[in-house]
């Protein structure tokens, strides 16, 4: 039984053997690896995640210093979430014409500067403004860093690479937030802001050095094309750069909006938001669940939450590897495991040690889906993924906002602190339903796509056989592979072609686009659709 994200790879270009001729054993291909640059980006996201969640640990110092209530101080967390929801797509559109390297440097420098503003804030209003603007910069960096990761990592490890970025956020909860809380309690909350500002400024320098493009002697286009490894399809991190300044902004925006025309992207975004809402509907109320239902001491709560973070980190690592094998399998498996873990937590919530074990399992099962959710968006919006990636970031934050609100609503109804877990289960099952609809739709989409390809290749094969007999069979096979690669949105060792835009980001005539997208098809209407990559056989 096959799933929509597992494509057959029984035959590859050049793998056919000629009868009567011995074939030398092929040299083993190098094992694809996650580029080191991805871990640098994950370290930056560690800083961003620390800033996002550190407010929860320094609410009281902020409240006392600025003479505001704790609920008012808590609104700083809400302001950051709103900034992420709105800011990520806005920054994606505003920076489309900029190279991704420049965008990452600008956003992280702005993030650092805004934390200096926060550290110097004379009142609550200035601090709130600095938090909202910081979130906008954070959202812009997240989206572009994810796109950059898919450009420099081999397709075979896209799931692991994207999971590594999420791993930076998980480690922020494990290490960064407690460290920020300690700094805030020992030296004042402003010291925490200064620490984040200094570390992110250093990160901006490291990104500027590590992602600096350099031209290569064997590449006439130099850094605009980016050297790549034909064996893995990975680009050289030192030469990857896109030059989009010469393309009109409306053209870039139209290319980015292509992925939003069908239901595929909306189903993916819905799954993301529902999953995140499920996790945070339960997680937000773990503390009262432990103390008032399980009967544990308040002193044990930080250790339990740290254990949850360890489980989440393990889930991210395992899930990234699963996503490289099957994205939909990872999504369905993780959501099923999450629902089961939440149900187990609901059953044993009044037994201290059992509740702790169940919470760790919730962390592991829930966060194992993170890499797959991001990878799914890039499969749909392969050719122009920046806006789609930013909207996916917003979807995560929509879940961050809706989940705790839903949990608070059932507690307010007097249903107790177990009730948010029931809400989380229902949200996880709804996400699973949406994922099932996405799988069914993907199968129909793929069948329709393969039918379009067959209509192109059949006339080709008939003409080729008439012209050159046995030799035409080889030509037909290679032509079919070329068309298949163009349809899936990915050509080995190169970025996918998109209408009017070359892989490096330079404009080209429409006729040239059709010719290069499906070489040998004999017509510009070769069935090579620009509907976004479905290459899920990574």
Image: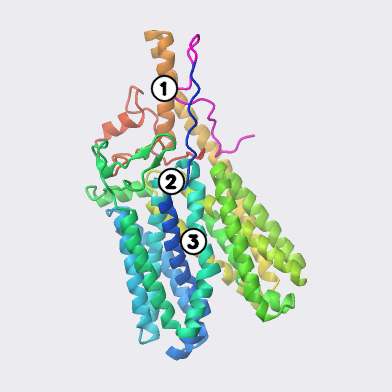
| Residues drawn in magenta | 1-22
Image position, residue 275 (x, y; %): 58, 58
Residue on which the image places disc 2 = 153
Image position, residue 188 (x, y; %): 45, 85
Question: Where does the N terminus fall, quadrant-wise?
Answer: top right
Circle 3 — which element? helix
Q: Earlier in the sequence, mark 2 or mark 3?
A: 2
Q: Is residue 427 left or right of residue 395?
A: right
Q: Magenta-highlighted stretch: main secondary structure?
A: loop
Residue on which the image places disc 3 = 168
Answer few, some or many: residues within 10 Å of disc 2's Cα (few below 14, many 20 plus, some between 14 and 19). many
Circle 2 — which element? loop
Q: Are marks 2 and 3 in contact (CB under 8 Å)?
A: no
Residue 514 can be seen, yes or no: yes
Q: Earlier in the sequence, mark 3 or mark 1?
A: 3
Q: Is residue 12 magenta?
A: yes
Q: Is residue 352 left or right of residue 302?
A: right
Closer-to-camera residue (378/530)? 378
Residue on which the image places disc 1 = 478
- How far separated are the C-alphas under marks 2 and 3? 17 Å
- How far separated are the C-alphas under marks 1 and 2? 26 Å
Q: Is residue 120 left or right of residue 11?
A: left
Answer few, some or many: residues within 10 Å of disc 1's Cα (few below 14, many 20 plus, some between 14 and 19). some
Q: Earlier in the sequence, mark 1 or mark 2?
A: 2
């Amino acid at each position: 039984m096959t799933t929509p994200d597992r494509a057959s790879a029984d035959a590859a270009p050049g793998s056919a053997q000629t009868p009567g001729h011995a074939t030398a054993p092929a040299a083993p291909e190098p094992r694809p690896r996650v580029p080191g640059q991805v871990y640098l980006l994950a370290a930056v996201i560690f800083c961003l995640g620390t800033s996002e969640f550190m407010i929860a640990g320094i609410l009281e110092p902020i409240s006392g210093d600025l003479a505001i209530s704790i609920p008012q101080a808590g609104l700083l967390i809400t302001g950051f979430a709103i900034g992420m929801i709105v800011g990520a797509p806005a920054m994606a559109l505003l920076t489309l014409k900029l190279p991704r390297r420049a965008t990452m440097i600008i956003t992280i420098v702005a993030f650092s500067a805004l934390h200096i503003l926060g550290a110097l804030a004379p009142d609550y209003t200035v601090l709130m403004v600095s938090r909202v603007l910081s979130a906008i910069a954070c959202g812009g960096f997240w989206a572009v860093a994810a796109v950059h990761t898919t450009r420099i990592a081999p397709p075979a490890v896209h799931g692991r690479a994207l999971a590594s970025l999420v791993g930076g956020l998980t480690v922020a909860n494990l290490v960064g937030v407690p460290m920020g809380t300690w700094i805030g309690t020992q030296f004042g909350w402003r010291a925490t802001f200064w620490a984040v500002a200094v570390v992110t400024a250093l990160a901006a320098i490291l990104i500027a050095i590590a992602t600096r493009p350099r031209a290569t002697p064997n590449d006439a286009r130099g850094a605009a094309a980016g050297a790549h490894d034909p064996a893995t399809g990975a680009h050289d991190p030192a030469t990857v750069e896109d030059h989009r300044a010469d393309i009109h902004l409306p053209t870039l925006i139209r290319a980015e909006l292509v992925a939003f025309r069908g239901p595929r992207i909306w189903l993916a975004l819905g799954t993301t938001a529902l999953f995140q809402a499920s996790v945070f509907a339960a997680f937000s109320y773990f503390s009262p669940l432990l103390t008032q239902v399980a009967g544990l001491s308040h002193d044990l709560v930080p250790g339990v939450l740290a254990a949850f973070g360890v489980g989440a980190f393990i889930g991210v690592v395992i899930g990234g590897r699963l996503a490289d094998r099957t994205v939909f399998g990872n999504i369905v498996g993780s959501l099923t495991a999450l629902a089961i873990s939440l149900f187990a937590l609901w059953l044993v919530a009044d037994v201290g040690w059992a509740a702790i074990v169940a919470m760790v399992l919730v962390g592991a099962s829930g966060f194992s889906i993170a890499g797959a959710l991001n990878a799914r968006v890039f499969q749909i919006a392969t050719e122009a993924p920046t806006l789609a990636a930013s909207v996916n970031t917003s979807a995560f934050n929509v879940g961050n906002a809706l989940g705790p609100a839903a949990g608070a609503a059932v507690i307010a109804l007097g249903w107790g602190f177990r009730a948010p877990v029931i809400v989380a289960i229902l949200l996880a099952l709804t996400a699973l339903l949406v994922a099932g609809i996405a799988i069914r739709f993907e199968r129909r989409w793929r069948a329709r796509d393969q039918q379009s390809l067959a209509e192109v290749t059949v006339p080709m094969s008939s003409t080729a056989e008439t012209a050159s007999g046995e030799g035409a069979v080889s030509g037909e096979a290679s032509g079919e592979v070329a068309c298949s690669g163009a349809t899936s949105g990915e050509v080995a060792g190169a970025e996918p072609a998109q209408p009017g835009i070359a892989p490096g980001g330079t404009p080209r005539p429409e006729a040239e686009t059709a010719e290069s997208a499906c070489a040998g098809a004999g017509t510009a209407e070769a069935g090579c659709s620009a509907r976004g990559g479905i290459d899920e056989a990574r």
